[in-house]
Image (cartoon, helix red, strand yellow):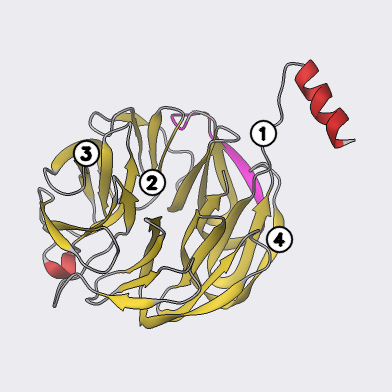
Amino acid sequence: MPVLGIFASQMSGHLAPPATTFLTVAFGSSASATSSDGVTWTSRTMPSTRDWYALFYANGRFVIAGYGSTTSAYSTDGISWTTTTLPNSSNWVQTGFGNSTWVIQGQNQPSSFAVSTNNAVTWSAASAGSGIATSSSVFGNGVFVSAETQANLGTNAWYSSNGTSWTNGGSLGATTGWGRGYYNASAGGFLITANTSTNYVSQSTTGTGSWTLRTLPATASWGGALAYGNGVWSYLTNTAAASSTDGISWTSRTTPAATGFGSMWYSTNYNLFVAVINGGVLYTSSTGTGSWTSRTLPSSSNWASVATTG
């Protein structure tokens, strides 16, 4: 029957997308939900009630951390989870993977990198340096990149090939509370967002220097709902939205909801942006520039993280 189904789909001119798992996890509860298409969602349960955050998918598994705790967890399907122990309690805000290494970033605290080289099973502590507080953990161009936060006067970027030894990558162009990082090689390279009310992001093609401020179309608390797909960067907040094809020039868009967005992910298999908010819905779009559609989630939880397998 599966063979006949695929054949019928091909004959009709439509090839079914590869098997995909969408996952969203709530902050401050044990709620999670999975979907095979980003549209219809099924209620799932995390290993415990916790401030689950910093969800990421890579290397065959979802990895997430408990904000303000020593707990992390991983799963291959978003349903069954294995909990692990982080080296210290930190405000874990972003997870990245590259060079066969997982790095989870703790915000506003020195010695706040958790590093794993065995696919998120065991973790060790690392630091950019004494007194340096950073807030992002994004991988691209062969390096992890992290940005200084407001607690450290928020000026410089740092980079590392292994998540353990960090090098100063130069000024981000402004002193502010820098937030999360993002990367796409064909659309400007690295983007670092601010977690304060601003009208800019900082951009670098390499992540190891030459950072430039790029102007967003509105001043807002832009946060972390940013993703690249379908040829565009899409960025959402509760008061503004923007898109860009290169990370340099940005166009104002209409936000689909007046509620704070937690995060956003793009599914290449479904050509779909998925953005989560604090409430019983999430929003999807095939373009990332408009025509957002609300989708019903199993509960009205604080849905703060989302990711997909493809």
Residue 157: x %, y % from top left: 17, 56
Return the residue at label 2: 237
Q: Earlier in the sequence, mark 4 or mark 2?
A: 4
Q: Which of marks 3 and 4 is nearer the N terminus?
A: 4
Q: Do the residues labelled 1 and 3 touch (CB within 8 Å)?
A: no
Numbered mark located on residue 17 in the image? 1
Circle 3 Cα neighbour tier, 10 Å, few/some/many (<14 / 14–19 / ≥20): many
Residue type at mark 1?
A: Pro
Q: Do the residues labelled 4 and 1 touch (CB within 8 Å)?
A: no
Front position among marks 2 and 1: 1
Q: Nearer the viewer, residue 38 or 236?
A: 38
Label 4: which secondary element: strand
**Which portion, as a residue range, is magenta?**
288-299
Q: Earlier in the sequence, mark 4 or mark 1?
A: 1
Extreme-right residue of the structure: 1
Q: Quadrant of the N terminus?
A: top right
The CA distance from mark 1 to mark 3 is 31 Å
Return the residue at label 4: 43
Q: Which of marks 2 and 3 is nearer the N terminus?
A: 3
The CA distance from mark 3 to mark 4 is 40 Å
Residue 175: x %, y % from top left: 10, 56
The CA distance from mark 4 to mark 1 is 23 Å
Residue type at mark 2?
A: Thr
Residue 82 in magenta?
Answer: no
Q: In which quarter of the image is the C terminus?
A: top right
| Residue 259 visible somewhere in the drawing | no
Q: Are marks 3 and 4 in contact (CB under 8 Å)?
A: no
Q: Which of marks 1 and 3 is nearer the N terminus?
A: 1
Return the residue at label 3: 205
The CA distance from mark 4 to mark 2 is 26 Å
Label 2: which secondary element: loop
Residue 125: x %, y % from top left: 32, 78
